[in-house]
Image (cartoon, helix red, strand yellow):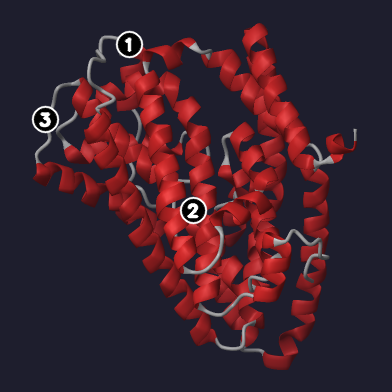
Amino acid sequence: MKYLRILYVQVIIGILAGVVVGSLFPSFAPTAKLISDMFINMIRMVIAPVIFFTIVLGVAGAGDLKKVGRVGGKGLLYFEVVTTIAIIIGLVVANVIKPGAGVTHSSVTGANVKAITDTKGFDWADFILHIVPANVVDAFAKGDIIQILFFGILFSIGLKQLGNNGKSVIITFEKLNKVLFNILRIIMRVSPLGAFGGMAFTIGKYGFTTLLILGKLMLTFYITVLLFIFVVLNLIARYYNFSLWKLLGYIKAELLIVFGSSSSESVLPNIMAKLENAGCEKSVVGLIIPAGYSFNLDGTSIYLSLSVIFLAQVFNVPLSLGQELSVIGILLITSKGAAGITGSGFLVLASTLTALKVVPVEGLGLLIGVDRFMSEARALTNMIGNTVATVVIARSENAVDLIRYKAVVENRVRIEEKD
């Protein structure tokens, strides 16, 4: 019975119960969605202040603002390189396995087509403008991560320029941050219920029949993300002398929560706390994790490139090498800024197809049913990618306590969380 007290065991039970209830009682889906949405909203309730305080405490407490700029620059460069690799892997695997071969597009209904073609596309210029909040209160109210990150960095610089006069503000923020993480610990106790609701909704609403129709696409996507995680990210981890497997073991509870809720946002504050507790400097965690949720969406990048090729195959649209290179170029732009929540990739995919002007955007109707089943892997890959990125940047900056990291992550020694 002692194992039932462990969080990840409780989450596993919640996921399995969700599958059973969703299968046997499909009418429970609306209630299950309510449960899942309530849990995610509880997390979002603390995301904005946690990110803000973490950034301020990290940057204001850093010895040199040049280091902060260097960390940010390294992070953006890393994001661009790794997401490009993710996009290319998606294209290559889709061309080899050909998941769209033999699938007809007759299942696209008028309602689905209208819903897709009425969707407003993603605009890169709008995204750049969106980074700067017109109203910081509104940014906090909406929980807009990238705007909070921008304001947090400026606030940190302004606070640091106060010198000793700013210490009282930092002390107050430290106390408030501790309160927020205490709230987070309370919320995490109901995460098994959130995972149950998310899985019961997915199975209850969409069932397993959709998987039979588009099973090859599902299988191809899961193969691709596994290749990316256990080959690409594993090689990156080895190069920087840390174990991907042990890192995944350290965040196993968060992985299961993301799998159940289909949202990488659901564990954002918890991942930040765990990485700090593992010895990564607060300034690195505070910059890389929030920025990664807008610029380092590896799972979404794979999903986008794979789906473009899949739909081209469904509509028998042969893509030349030049056109596939164009796909890479377009996705390097449109994949940025997609939020780490369910359904975000769908909007960006519509924008990508519109910009490409080769594959009919109406084909997205084929993906509506199966998209939810791929969102779990998409969110998991996004979260793992950002966790690895943070450790990589921290190690490259010598901004990690290696003794603490090895004790906490590799040897699983329980150490009290860092103040």
Q: Residues within 10 Å of mark 2 (few under 14, many from 20)?
A: many
| Residue in the picture at 57% in, 44% down | 264
The alpha-carbon separation of the residues under discs 1 and 3 comes to 24 Å
**Residue 255 visible from this viewpoint:** yes
| Residue in the picture at 52% in, 68% down | 241
Q: Is residue 64 left or right of residue 186?
A: left
Q: Looking at the picture, which amino acid does disc 3 mark?
A: Pro
The alpha-carbon separation of the residues under discs 2 and 3 comes to 32 Å
Q: Nearer the viewer, residue 146 or 417?
A: 417
Residue that badge 3 annotates: 318
What is the x, y in percent for residue 324?
17, 43
Q: Is residue 249 above or below residue 310?
A: below
Residue that badge 1 annotates: 109
- Based on the displayed image, in which of its 4 quarters is residue 38 positioned? top right
| Residue in the picture at 34% in, 20% down | 365
In the rendered image, the quadrant that contains the N terminus is top right
| Residue in the picture at 49% in, 26% down | 373
Residue reaching furthest to the bottom: 164
Which one is earlier in the sequence, the residue at label 2 or at label 1?
1
Q: Are marks 2 and 3 in contact (CB under 8 Å)?
A: no
In the rendered image, the quadrant that contains the C terminus is bottom right
What is the x, y in percent for residue 418?
77, 70
Which one is earlier in the sequence, the residue at label 1 or at label 3?
1
Q: Nearer the viewer, residue 142 or 184?
A: 184
- Based on the displayed image, in which of its 4 quarters is residue 37 positioned? top right
Residue that badge 2 annotates: 385
